[in-house]
Amino acid sequence: MELHDVWFVLIAVLWTGYFFLEGFDFGVGVLTKLLARDRPEKRVLINTIGPVWDGNEVWLLTAGGATFAAFPEWYATLFSGFYLPLLVILLCLIVRGVAFEYRVKRPEENWQRNWETAIFWTSLVPAFLWGVAFGNIVRGVKIDRDLEYVGSLWDLFNPYALLGGLVTLALFTFHGTVFTALKTVGEIRERARVLALRVGLVTVVLAVLFLLWTQIDSGDGTSLVALVVAVAALVAALMANQAGREGWSFTLSGVTIVATVAMFFLTLFPNVMPSTLDADWSLTVTNASSSPYTLKIMTWLAAIATPVVVVYQGWTYWVFRKRIGTQHLADAAH
Amino acid sequence: MDMALAPETLARWQFGITTVYHFLFVPLTISLAALTAGLQTAWVRTEKEKYLRATKFWGKLFLINIAMGVVTGIVQEFQFGMNWSDYSRFVGDVFGAPLAFEALIAFFFESTFIGLWIFGWDKLPKKIHLACIWMVSIGTLLSAYFILAANSWMQHPVGYRINEEKGRAELTDFWAVLTQNTTLNQVFHSFSAAFLTGGAFMVGIAAFHLMRKKHIPVMRTSLRLGLVTLAVGGLLTAVSGDTLGKVMYEQQPMKMAAAEALWDGEKPAPFSVFAYGDVDEGHNKVALEIPGLLSFLAHSDFESYVPGINDTNEALQKQFGPGDYKPIVPVAYWGFRWMIGFGMASFSLGLLGLWLTRKRFLLPAAWRTGEDEVPHLVLLKKPLGARLTRLYWLLALWTMGFPLIANSWGWIFTEMGRQPWVVYGLFQTRDAVSPGVSTAEVLTSMIAFTLLYAVLAVIEVRLLVKYVKAGPPELTEADLNPPTKIGGDLRDADKPMAFSY
């Protein structure tokens, strides 16, 4: 296994970390409209991710920075090619971060309501668009001999990619629902479990369709294994939810995310961004990667820093392990 | 194509707008994180309530500010790929590594521990909670260090080789990138300017309350801390500015010649105080100069030769082939002056304040004040009159944004002064833009970011004003009795959180 292969795996790990973590906090954002009955419940939802959403988002920045360093050509083609969808994602993430932090800073109802609406939309839209983006990466896009994206904006919104978007949206919402069941107490917890069943069933249907389509299009033996794991874990997560085993349900929905991302990357390898115009113009782990020296330094960095990050982020979850309900909310503004 | 709408022009505008905007928040975040941490340390060590109230007050302003810093920083991580894909392809092997280091080491630190700090008041024992804000502070400093190392490589590329076959720069010595003198000087200069900024911010707000004789114990302490930070930060900014300038004279003589609007080399060279140039003709129409000073700034003696814009342009043409290697001279010239002018103004105000509010040194005993009194402003033997005192407080308040202007012009100067290069001597800005991105796309994103940023600026400033006016919060029982166990008190199942979103 050469270093650029190692980095292919590490980029997959970073995206997995991102989707696993921000997946549920996007989901929680969506639930502010789907699950919460009143504004105190919305607040409970927001506070389940309050201390952690920012750290979760850094997985994305790290995936971006690491892609720049390890696969500059991939970074350049992907982000200049998917320009407008990425712009929308960035705008959403900007508003979303400010919304969490500023919502409680004024007591006026209008002010808080507006930020709550913002949290809903800026969670929903990126959750959908990341799926569209990965759908396109996996399926391949029009890349010319200079490794430039030459397709149009509308090429990115093809049926396969749109289905991918629905899958990530549904899956993250499901992940957020079981997370809510795990992190809250009181009535909202019960309703989260009921909602998890419904969202989960929709997710199963969408995911099976999308993953099978992926498998038939460009899968092989290993991707089939990932597919089976993803679907089995999702079904098991639903069963665990029905049995009231919230910890298991959350873990298993996490496994679904891990397996889904794994399937994307297994399908891709050794490409990182296939060209639909000519297979020779595809970006691959070899033609898109950095020099061995840079990859070596990056490998040292990842080997030392990543475990440390996982430990202290994990510790944060432990510090804030207590379930919360409406009775735990602090004053309405401070 | 019309230059005004060329993707290069628009991409540069967008980079300028988003980066200058981002950098309004960065220096405040860096300094306020450390200052808040310092105040909290004082609380933990002395248990004096004024320190905890100060921690909460400045901590709140810090949080309002860092939220903007964080979210506007996300754009920076992706903007290179979006608008500057050919740049990314050319430099990624070198430039990407410090960005990845920044994300994996600094961003995780900052973001994770800030969550622990915000929500941790009733979940973490005092000392661990204190450690969290220090971690945030370390995170902000590390983040700035790595991104400045990346920028320094654009100013003065080292530790690389050119791979002709792949048409890109490749890293050969990462240590050189992290420790070259451009990096160290830029880090020194930016860090000190950050503390100058935070000091001025603290002084201005403390002055606002002291003028009204409100929240005196907290604001008196804050004033003192702010003044010391401002004075030390200002002094170090000047010192590091001088050394960074000397480095730049070696590495980018064109930038420094433009900073002086020195069209033709002179020996000894004068420092220009005011000039109005005729750019097309290549000389100044009006010039007010201090003889010999520029030679000193460049080479530490009053005699030596300093090359001018025209000489340097010719030398660069010989080195790199035909072309125009001049930046926009008036921008470099005035940017340089505004940077120094606004920075020095704040620094002077800080020095003055430090003297006026001295506690004992050469201060007649009659004018010494206690911890719950507004300090007298004593110039020599007697306090200033009511009008002059008020004038000083007002000046401090209304100039608290000066360092922000200085920082912005500093960046505009150093980035625009490097043009036409994006990586000095290696790669020109016009070759750096994304060939596949259309004018409409860049225009869309530029307008979207500008509008959103404008709206957020209004919201942010109004929130800051609200919390500045509110003053330090009263302390609660919970504040004074922090938990002794990690995770807080788990027995009282329904106890409300100390803080919730």
Image: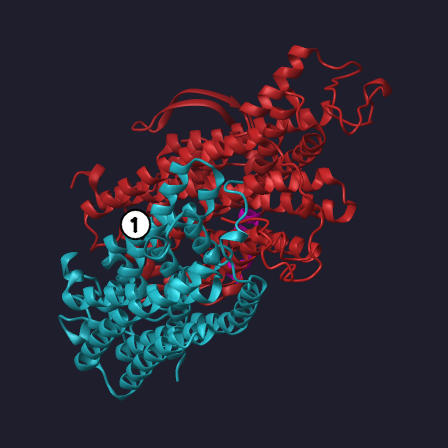
Classify residue B474 as left or right of residue A219.
right
Classify residue A139 as left or right of residue B426.
left
Residue A128's spot in the image, x, y percent? 27, 60
Task: Name the residue rendered at 46%, 54% in the picture.
Answer: A44
Residue A27: image quadrant is bottom left
Please rate how many residues cluster around mark 1, counting C-alpha atoms within 10 Å: few if below 14, some from 14 to 19, many from 20: few
Classify residue B376 as left or right of residue A126.
right
Location of the N terminus of chain B by quadrant is top left
Residue B241's spot in the image, x, y percent? 56, 39
Residue B143's spot in the image, x, y percent? 52, 54
Q: Color of chain B here?
A: red
Q: Which residue is mark 1?
A: B321
Chain on which label 1 sits: B
- Residue at the limit of the structure toward the bottom, as seen here: A221
Type of the residue with mark 1:
Gly
Residue B233: image quadrant is top right
Residue A89's spot in the image, x, y percent? 31, 54
Q: Is residue B178 magenta?
A: yes
Q: How is the image coloured?
A: by chain
Classify residue A235 as left or right of residue B231.
left
Task: Name the residue rendered at 82%, 27% in the picture.
Answer: B361
Is residue A84 at least partly visible in the picture?
A: yes
Task: Name the residue rendered at 29%, 28% in the picture.
Answer: B280
**Camera-side residue of A321 and B90:** A321
Q: Which residues are magenta?
A: B176-187
Q: Main secondary structure of the magenta part?
A: helix
Residue A46's place in the image compared with B204, above or below, is below
Is residue B308 at least partly visible in the picture?
A: no
**Camera-side residue of B381 and B494:** B494
Of all chains in the rendering, the one displayed in cyan is A
Residue B441's place in the image compared with B339, above or below, is below
Q: Secondary structure at mark 1?
A: loop
